[in-house]
Amino acid sequence: MVVMFFASWATAGTGGIAEPLAFRGFDRPWTCLTYPFAFVSPGSEFFWIVMAWVWLYVVGEALEARIGWRNYVLSFLGYSALAAVCVGVGSILVARRVPLFEPWLPISALTCAWAATDPAGPVLLLGVIPVQRRWIAVLSVVSDVVYIGMASPIVGLMAALPCVLAWYVGNGAFSSGRRGTVVSGRGQKAQSSREFDEFITKVRSREKEREEQDRLRKLFEGGDDGTSGTP
């Protein structure tokens, strides 16, 4: 993503490379996955794009620790495609083509998934204001509706649908385990390691108890022999 940003900036004067990657409808279906890497105004939006990268790193690190890097990458691409489909269908309904550029929609969806893992968890907004994660998710949804809704309010509402799905996925609604808990990847390995350590501790404890019992038994047997041999 960083490489594509600077490539878009370097080629801006010659037409750029963003247009072939942008989503403008289902006539180019591959753009459902490529539009997050299309930067149309890399110079004027540099600050906001960097902030988006920083936030994606924060959210991505937390999600990767839960689901593993492969599932995280698949989630990013999946939410990107789902958002494009929603916007594409909405564009057909309103008879107005709404293009998609840049990674704002998948980042919002991942933010909702991250927030759903601990809705009441505290976060310092702008590094100063303490807010709960659930309100960060609400802010992400509202930003999607406004961002896309400037072209069409109906399409803006449809663009926020992946955020709703991401919330339920992050909350564990579609998992077979405990609600709100997703354990895989490194988390599953850590849990298995803890269980193995507990098992080894129990085995060693039982061995010590057995050795102590054998020592006491031999001690009593030796005392009985000494007593019987006394005249």
Image (cartoon, grey):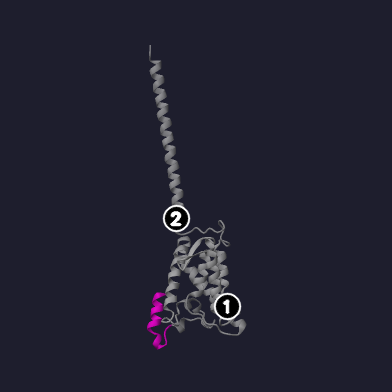
Marks 1 and 2 sit apart, C-alpha to C-alpha, by: 40 Å
The front one of 130 and 28 is 130
Q: Position of residue 207 (x, y in %)?
A: 42, 37
Residue 89 appears in the picture as rendered: no
Q: Tell me which amino acid carries mark 1.
A: Gly
In the image as oriented, which residue stretches furthest toward the bottom?
14
Q: Position of residue 210 (x, y in %)?
A: 43, 34
| Left or right position of 89 against 17 | right
Dot 2 corresponds to which residue? 189
At mark 2, the secondary structure is helix
Q: Quadrant of the C terminus?
A: top left
Dot 1 corresponds to which residue? 156
Residue depicted at 55% across the width and 72% down the height: 141
Q: Quadrant of the N terminus?
A: bottom left
Residue 8 in magenta stretch: yes
Q: Position of residue 206 (x, y in %)?
A: 44, 38
The vertical placement of 223 against 154, above or below, is: above
Front of the two marks 1 and 2: 1
At mark 1, the secondary structure is helix
Q: Earlier in the sequence, mark 1 or mark 2?
A: 1
Q: Tell me which amino acid carries mark 2.
A: Lys
Q: Main secondary structure of the magenta part?
A: helix
Answer yes or no: do the residues labelled 1 and 2 have beta carbons within 8 Å?
no
Residues shaded magenta: 1-17
Quadrant of residue 60 within the rendered picture: bottom left
